[in-house]
């Protein structure tokens, strides 16, 4: 565990001295704010229309109208930027010819993979943390449902684990960071397309299978405030799969 934390600390330092983390944070924060305030405008307009019809202030579900669409759209933005966060993790080592030094160090392959993954996940968690001002700001003007909000953030953290493990796997395949980002994006968009396919085959056995494999389907349960073992197992299993594939690729390269 000590070796994992040491390597994670080293990778975090590299993130903080590189402009990529700051650029991604700025883009993510700007887009997240835009998505949220668009939903606030929609909520305000919906409330005004309902008040004109009913003659009193309507009781609208704040979480369903504001946060659920925001988080689901935010997940799409994360799908686009997470490959940029992971593309350098192994590709940069290969290009700089420092892979040999890493492989001959006392660290095991498992420690190397987990250390790099942990560093990326910490950065990802910090990105999500930047959006906490949105519900905190809203809580001064309205009642915020904190339990479904906490479930939503848990779902996004687990989704990030999948994104990052697949990105790490893509980075282990090549020394070109751009190629790694493209491979990672291809894998993630594939999972997203599975969800879209499931919507067109909803009444068939194949549709049920695609629905279970859909990232969006499982994330939506968390965003609605539902936490169950089925969704937890799904995200954790995919994260472990990505880390396992990364381990196998790195291990095969060690013996070349």
Image (tube, grey):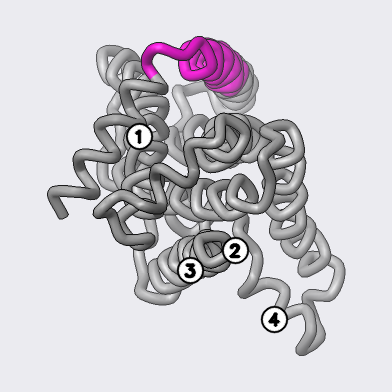
Which is closer to the viewer, label 3 or label 4? Answer: 3
Mark 4 → mark 2, Cα distance in angstroms: 38 Å
* Cα distance in 3D space between marks 4 and 1: 30 Å
Q: What span is colored magenta in the figure?
A: 16-40
Above or below, 111 relative to 28: below
Which badge, 3 or 4, is on the more N-terminal residue?
4
Q: Quadrant of the C terminus?
A: bottom right
Q: Is residue 26 magenta?
A: yes
- On the image, numbered disc 4 is attached to which residue? 209
Q: Give the labeled residue for mark 2.
A: 256
Q: Position of residue 50 (x, y in %)?
A: 59, 26
Q: Observer-nearest residue: 187 or 159?
A: 187
Instruction: Residue 125: give its label.
Output: 1
Mark 3 crowd level (few <14, some 14–19, many ≥20, 10 Å Cα):
some
- Label whose residue precedes the other's in the sequence (4 or 1): 1
Foreground mark, 4 or 1, reads: 1
Q: Secondary structure at mark 2?
A: loop
> Earlier along the polypeptide chain: callout 1 or callout 2?
1
Evaluate if marks 3 and 2 touch, with contact meaning CB atoms under 8 Å apart.
no
């Amino acid at each position: 565990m000590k070796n994992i934390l040491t390597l994670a600390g080293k990778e975090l330092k590299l993130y903080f001295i590189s402009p990529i983390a700051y650029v991604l944070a700025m883009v993510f924060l700007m887009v997240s704010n835009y998505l949220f305030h668009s939903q606030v405008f929609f909520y305000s307009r919906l409330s005004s229309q309902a008040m004109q019809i009913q003659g009193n202030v309507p009781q609208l579900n704040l979480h369903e109208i504001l946060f659920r669409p925001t988080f689901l759209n935010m997940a799409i933005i994360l799908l686009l930027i997470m490959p940029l966060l992971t593309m350098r993790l192994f590709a940069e080592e290969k290009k700089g010819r420092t892979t040999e030094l890493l492989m001959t160090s006392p660290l095991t392959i498992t420690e190397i993979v987990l250390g790099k993954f942990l560093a990326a996940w910490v950065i990802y968690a910090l990105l999500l943390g930047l959006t906490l001002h949105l519900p905190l700001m809203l809580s001064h003007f309205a009642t915020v449902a904190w339990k479904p909000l906490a479930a939503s953030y848990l779902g996004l953290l687990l989704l990030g684990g999948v994104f990052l493990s697949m990105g790490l796997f893509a980075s282990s395949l090549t020394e070109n960071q751009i190629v790694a980002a493209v491979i990672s994006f291809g894998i993630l968009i594939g999972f997203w397309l599975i969800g879209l396919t499931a919507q067109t085959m909803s009444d068939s056995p194949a549709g049920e299978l695609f629905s279970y494999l859909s990232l969006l389907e499982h994330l939506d349960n968390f965003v609605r405030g539902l936490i169950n073992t089925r969704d937890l197992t799904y995200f954790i299993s995919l994260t472990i799969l990505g880390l396992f594939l990364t381990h196998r690729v790195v291990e095969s390269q060690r013996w070349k």
